[in-house]
Amino acid sequence: MIGKWLREFREFAMKGNVVDMAVGIIIGAAFGKIVTSLVNDVIMPPIGLLTGNMDFGQLFINLGETTHASLEAAEAAGAPVIKYGLFINNILDFVLVAAAIFIVIRAMNRLRARQEAAPPPEPPAEVKLLGEIRDLLKAGR
């Protein structure tokens, strides 16, 4: 019974689509790091400069009776808060990551289209000669 289970598991694990999926996940994780770095290290600094280094993560609505100077102070006091600034940050992150992925995929598609549009290589001289012989034989019939 265990032997049959192991055989079925080995067949499942060695199928091409499982291996392809594993490779895709690994490459996707690595690509995710590249996109995150692009957003955090290249795109966000100019946006921060344009917004005067405003930290949206600190924006909140205090639902409690007492006032608090910062989100951390409100959380430390246990005050109920709506952290809409973090929500804005997450939306911005999503939009920037989606835009970065779109730009990268678009560039990759353009490169692929150029490669596919390239003319096929010139056939070897032997193939050309055989084609000419074939054409002469057809014409002589």
Image: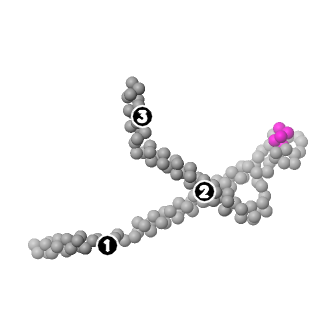
- The image quadrant that residue 136 belongs to is bottom left
Residue count near mark 2 (Cα–Cα under 10 Å), binned few <14, some 14–19, many ≥20? some
Question: Do the CB atoms of the residues marked 1 and 3 lie less than 8 Å apart?
Answer: no
Above or below, 94 against 17 in this view is below
Q: Which mark is residue 122?
A: 1
The answer to whether one can see residue 63 in this image is no
**Label 3, label 2: how far apart the Cα atoms are:** 35 Å
Q: Disc 2 residue type?
A: Val
The chief SS type of the magenta part is helix
Residue on which disc 2 sits: 35
The mark nearer the N terminus, 1 or 2, is 2
At x 83%, y 38%, the residue is 78
The residue tagged 3 is: 9
Marks 3 and 2, the one that precedes in the sequence:
3
Residue 121 in the image: above or below residue 15:
below
Split into 4 quadrants, where in the image is the N terminus?
top left
x and y percentages locating residue 105 in the rendered image? 53, 60
Q: How packed is label 3: few (under 14 Cα within 10 Å), some, or many (20 or more)?
A: few
Image coordinates of residue 48 in percent, x first then y, are 74, 61
Q: Is residue 128 left or right of residue 86?
A: left
Of helix, strand and loop, which one carries label 1? loop
Q: What's the residue type where badge 3 is placed?
A: Phe
- Element on which disc 2 rests: helix
- The magenta-colored residue range is 74-78
Image point (41%, 26%), residue name: 2
Alpha carbon of mark 1 to alpha carbon of mark 2: how far? 40 Å
Give the amino acid at mark 1: Glu
Give yes or no for contact between labels 3 and 2 (Cβ–Cβ under 8 Å): no
Q: How many marks?
A: 3
x, y (%) of residue 107? 52, 64
Instruction: Find out whether residue 120 is within the magenta segment.
Output: no
Q: Residue at x 40, y 45 (%)?
A: 16
